Image: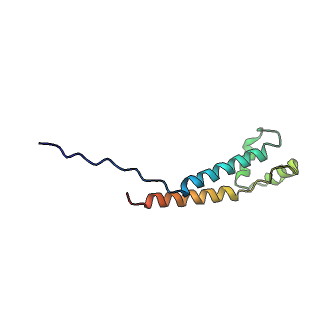
C-alpha cells in the first residue's frame, strides 16, 4: 500500500499594508530618536522614551531645549498611522483564504 502524501501547507502571502505599516513605525522611531538625540545625545533615553507617544509633559521642555533645527519636531502621528496600517495588514493577511 502506498501512503497518501499530505499536501504541504501553503504560507499566506502578506498583505502589502503589513510591511508598509512596519516600515512607517520604523521611520517614526528613527525620527523620534534622531530628533530627541539632539539634546545630550543618547543620554536620558529613559525620560525621552515617554516622548515616543507624545504624552509626557517633558516633551515640551525637551523641544524648548533643542530649539529650531533642520529636523521637524517629532509627531507621534506617524507612529500611530504605522500601528493602524500594521493592524489592518495583519487582519487582512489573516482573513485571506489559503
Q: Nearer the viewer, residue 10 or 50?
A: 10
Task: Note whether 25 is above or below 97 in the view shown.
Answer: above
The answer to whether 72 appears left or right of 81 in the picture is right
Q: Nearer the viewer, residue 35 or 49?
A: 35
Name the residue rendered at 80%, 54% in the picture: 73
Name the residue rendered at 62%, 50% in the picture: 23
Q: Position of residue 80 (x, y in %)?
A: 65, 58
Q: How many marks?
A: 0
The answer to whether 80 appears left or right of 93 in the picture is right
Task: Note whether 93 is above or below 30 in the view shown.
Answer: below
Q: Position of residue 98 (x, y in %)?
A: 37, 57
Q: Nearer the viewer, residue 49 or 32?
A: 32
Name the residue rendered at 70%, 46% in the picture: 30
Image colouring? rainbow
The answer to whether 71 appears left or right of 12 in the picture is right
Residue most extreme to the left: 1
Q: Nearer the viewer, residue 58 or 81?
A: 81
Q: Position of residue 88 (x, y in %)?
A: 54, 61
- Quadrant of the drawing holding the N terminus: top left
Q: Quadrant of residue 84?
A: bottom right
Q: Position of residue 34 (x, y in %)?
A: 76, 45
Amino acid at each position: 500500500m502506498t501512503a497518501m502524501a499530505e499536501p504541504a501547507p501553503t504560507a499566506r502571502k502578506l498583505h502589502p499594508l503589513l510591511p508598509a505599516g512596519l516600515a512607517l513605525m520604523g521611520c517614526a522611531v528613527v525620527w523620534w530618536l534622531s530628533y530627541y538625540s539632539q539634546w545630550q545625545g543618547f543620554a536620558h533615553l529613559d525620560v525621552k522614551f515617554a516622548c515616543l507617544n507624545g504624552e509626557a509633559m517633558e516633551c515640551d521642555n525637551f523641544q524648548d531645549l533643542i530649539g529650531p533645527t533642520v529636523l521637524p519636531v517629532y509627531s507621534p502621528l506617524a507612529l500611530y498611522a504605522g500601528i493602524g496600517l500594521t493592524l489592518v495588514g495583519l487582519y487582512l493577511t489573516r482573513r485571506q483564504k489559503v
